Amino acid sequence: MAETEFNARGVRIEKNLRSVTRAGQVLIKDGRLELLTSNGREIDSAPVQSVRAGRPWFTDGDQARATVNGTRYRLTLAEQDAAAPAAPAEGGAASRFLDAIRSARGRAGKD
């Protein structure tokens, strides 16, 4: 079960309105969400079951928010950065991120 369910590079990751990295990586693999710096160093990670994710209310662009281990992050994903599935998905990279969280939760619940 080493399949990567979602992988986006070049992601701007912000915490408390401060930029943590401008070219980070968001990875969902084996039922875990990982936020990584551009060097591959871990910023934060948690099982998808404990991650809260959604869209910020008033934003421009392709953004998502995620609460990981009690810390709120804002993720700005670019359309070309997310690994797109074979069938085109609507709504861009943030929508694919949220869909990947939901589907990973469903798989983790069945195990």
Image (spheres, rainbow, N blue to C red):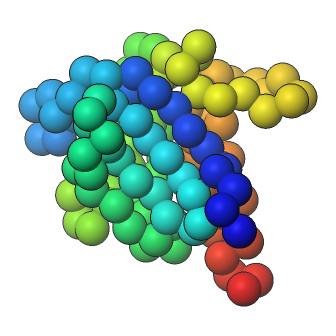
Q: Is residue 60 above or below residue 103?
A: above
Q: Residue at x 46, y 52 (%)?
A: 53
| Horizontal and vertical percent position of residue 2 | 66, 62
| Horizontal and vertical percent position of residue 49 | 51, 73
Q: Residue at x 23, y 66 (%)?
A: 70
Task: Give the quadrant of residue 85.
Answer: top right
Say whether residue 76 is visible: no
Query: Considering the image in quadrants, where does the N terminus appear?
Result: bottom right
Q: How many marks?
A: 0
Q: In the displayed structure, does residue 58 sit left or right of residue 104? A: left
Q: Is residue 15 above or below residue 21?
A: below
| Horizontal and vertical percent position of residue 60 | 41, 14
Q: In the displayed structure, does residue 55 sit left or right of residue 82? A: left
Q: Residue at x 54, y 20 (%)?
A: 81
Task: Give the quadrant of residue 46.
Answer: bottom left
Q: In the displayed structure, does residue 19 sit left or right of residue 61? A: left
Q: In the displayed structure, does residue 24 sit left or right of residue 55? A: left
